[in-house]
């Protein structure tokens, strides 16, 4: 029996069982009920697209979200380098980093790098454990791998840097042992979607945290105070209006269009939009990098240059407008993205460039509504 046949024999019963038995740990209705009982205002529809990351503990009335860089169901947790866990109400995430070597490293700490930026500096973690796994290669035999696993808490901002970077930029260094150090990278098939889903949910619950006073909810963050929000000019005093007007005059043409919500893109159809679609395919890697690095004006400029009116393009415009503080415009673009997701030709990007649509557009809209 070939290795492929072995895998199919194992997988088909799994599909059968999954189809016949609902997993209560993934139940969105239960998760929404538990979260709402704790003071969160969360709808089941928002959780639906993230249900694979939901973990319900009905005995303790807890809900937490967990996702990893590598989510291949055939291999389980074997090749996962990073796992994030978040429980609504916490102001941090739990990050788990695991090595995968044929020999024990006997490491004493880990450091985590995004590019050359050190996100974690020689942390011994609050939990360290060891494990082994057997990877079956069929006729090629089996390999026993050792795992040294560290769990530690991460601020949301640091977790975002890890989740949103290109996987090639992420390095986890297991060091301090007899071997000096071993650098680990995500598996070549890792897609980082699980990590991104968890930080997106954490970001959402960060602005909908219960028991905040009205004063705290209305007080802008330092990041928001630095933004120039042209949508609120009419509500400001005359000196502030003048300052905002002067700042607005310094904006590029595209940024002014972005802020006003007036960017219109070609709607692809049976006989148009092919050139824009070809350009979009060629520039998808660039868009992913601009989005991950938070270069919002350049992201909007690139989307405008491509000029393809699909759900992903309008999502990018909505995210850029949101991050720059153009809330009314952001809502407009996000609505357009959600609408395009319903169309036959423009809604094919279901999980494009690591973004799940329309779920992530709806999530940002929910954050806007919760903050206002």
Image (cartoon, rainbow, N blue to C red):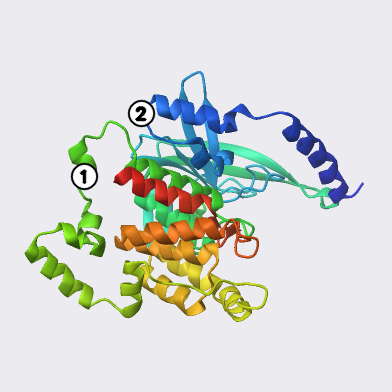
Residue at the spot 62% in from the left edge and 47% down from the top edge: 71
Residue 323 in percent (x, y) is at 34, 60
Q: Is residue 356 above or below residue 258?
A: above
Circle 1: element type:
helix
Q: Is residue 38 above or below residue 111?
A: above
Q: Is residue 42 above or below residue 24?
A: below
In the rendered image, the residue lying farthest to the left is 239
**For residue 12, side relative to residue 203 (left or right):** right
Query: Label 1 crowding class (10 Å Cα cut-off): few <14, some 14-19, many 20+?
Result: few
**For residue 26, side relative to residue 222 (left or right):** right
Q: Quadrant of residue 245?
A: bottom left
Circle 2: element type:
loop
* Closer to the camera in the image, 188 or 98: 188
Q: Is residue 135 visible?
A: yes
Q: Is residue 116 visible?
A: no
Q: Which residue is mark 2?
A: 39
* Closer to the camera in the image, 24 or 150: 24
Q: Earlier in the sequence, mark 1 or mark 2?
A: 2
Residue 220 in percent (x, y) is at 21, 50
**For residue 248, side relative to residue 15 (left or right):** left
Mark seen at residue 250? none
Q: Which residue is mark 1?
A: 218
């Amino acid at each position: 029996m070939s290795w492929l046949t072995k895998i199919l024999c194992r997988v088909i019963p799994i599909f059968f069982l999954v189809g016949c038995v609902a997993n209560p740990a993934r139940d969105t209705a239960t998760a929404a009920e538990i979260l709402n009982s704790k003071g969160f205002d969360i709808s089941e529809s928002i959780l639906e697209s993230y249900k694979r990351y939901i973990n319900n503990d009905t005995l303790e009335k807890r809900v937490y979200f967990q996702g990893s860089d590598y989510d291949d169901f055939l291999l389980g947790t074997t090749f996962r380098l990073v796992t994030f866990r978040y429980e609504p109400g916490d102001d941090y995430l739990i990050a788990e980093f695991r090595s995968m070597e044929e020999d024990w490293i006997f490491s004493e700490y880990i450091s985590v790098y995004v590019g050359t930026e050190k996100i974690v500096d020689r942390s011994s973690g609050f939990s360290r454990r060891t494990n082994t796994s057997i990877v079956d290669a069929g006729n090629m035999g089996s390999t026993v791998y050792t795992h040294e696993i560290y769990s530690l808490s991460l601020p949301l901002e640091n977790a975002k840097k890890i989740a949103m970077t290109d996987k090639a930029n992420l390095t986890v260094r297991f060091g301090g042992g007899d071997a000096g150090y071993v650098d680990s990278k995500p598996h070549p098939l890792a897609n980082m979607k699980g990590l991104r889903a968890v930080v997106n949910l954490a970001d959402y619950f960060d602005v909908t945290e219960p028991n905040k006073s009205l004063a705290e909810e209305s007080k802008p963050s330092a990041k928001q105070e630095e933004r120039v929000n042209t949508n609120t000019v009419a509500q400001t005093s005359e000196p502030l209006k003048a300052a905002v007007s002067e700042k607005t005059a310094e904006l590029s043409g595209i940024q002014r269009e972005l802020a006003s919500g007036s960017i219109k893109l070609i709607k692809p159809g049976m006989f148009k939009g092919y050139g824009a679609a070809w350009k979009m395919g060629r520039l998808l890697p660039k868009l992913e990098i601009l989005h991950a690095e938070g270069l919002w004006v350049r992201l909007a400029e690139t989307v405008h240059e491509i000029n393809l009116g699909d759900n992903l393009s309008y999502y990018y415009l909505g995210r850029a407008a949101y991050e720059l503080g153009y809330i009314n415009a952001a809502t407009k673009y996000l609505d357009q993205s959600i609408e395009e997701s319903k169309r036959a030709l423009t809604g094919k990007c279901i999980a494009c460039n690591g973004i799940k649509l329309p779920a992530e557009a709806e999530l940002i809209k929910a954050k806007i509504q919760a903050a206002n």
